[in-house]
Amino acid sequence: MERTFILLKPDCVQRRLMGQVIARFEQKGLNVIALKMLTITPDLAKQHYAEHVQKGWYPTLETFITGGPVVAAVIEGLEVIRVVREMLGATNGLNAAPGTIRGDYSSSRQMNLVHGSDGPEAAAREIAIYFTPAEICDYTPTITPWMRASDET
Ligand code: CDP
Ligand code: MG
């Protein structure tokens, strides 16, 4: 079972799309195992987006991501890192395919509603930035036997 980190960005919270976005992950059969609301500080933004800090567009990203509350979550499922990235769609909402979260709700390169880890190393790093081990709830939903066959692991 794999874990990924997602962040509902300030545009998602302000546009009142938190419930719809989380519902998509739940409907897919993925398990939400940690959830918290917070406001990102400039220091935290630089830590999260370390790979982008030197980019010319980083200052506007920092202003955006620190501009209102966000919701951080850990989601668990089979191949969940790839599955969530595909559910998000392309970075730029104008390029994201219809049916993806960004494709359905975003018309922006920056305000694309949701972050998802792009690989196992990023997932582990990002989960550790936002959550302590004690904040992650390890549980098996009782519906699991009706979500996939027992040999699908
Ligand atoms: O989020 P994703 O991995 O799809 O894209 P990224 O290339 O890692 O960029 C991180 C985030 O920076 C994006 O999700 C956008 O919100 C933002 N961004 C931006 O503001 N301007 C750009 N030219 C590219 C990305
Ligand atoms: Mg990225």
Image (tube, rainbow, N blue to C red):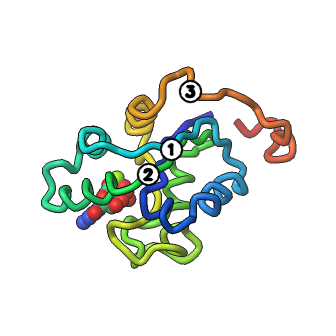
CB-based contact (under 8 Å), mark 1 and mark 3? no
Of circles 3 and 2, which is in front? 2
CB-based contact (under 8 Å), mark 1 and mark 2? yes
Q: Looking at the picture, which amino acid does disc 1 mark?
A: Met
Q: CA distance from mark 1 to mark 2?
A: 7 Å
What x and y, as percent, mark residue 124?
A: 43, 32
Q: Which residue is mark 2?
A: 69
Q: Is residue 140 above or below residue 19?
A: above
The quarter of the rendering in which ligand 1 is drawn is bottom left
Q: Quadrant of the N terminus?
A: top right
Q: Which residue is mark 1?
A: 37
Of circles 1 and 3, which is in front? 1
Q: Residue 124 bears which disc, if any? A: none
Residue at the far top in the pictured view? 134
Q: Which residue is mark 3?
A: 135
Helix, strand or loop at disc 3?
helix
Q: Residues within 10 Å of mark 1 (few under 14, many from 20)?
A: few
Marks 1 and 3, the one that precedes in the sequence: 1
Residue at 20% from the left image edge and 56% from the top image edge: 58
Residue at 30% from the left image edge and 39% from the top image edge: 44
Q: Looking at the picture, which amino acid does disc 3 mark?
A: Glu
Marks 1 and 2, the one that precedes in the sequence: 1
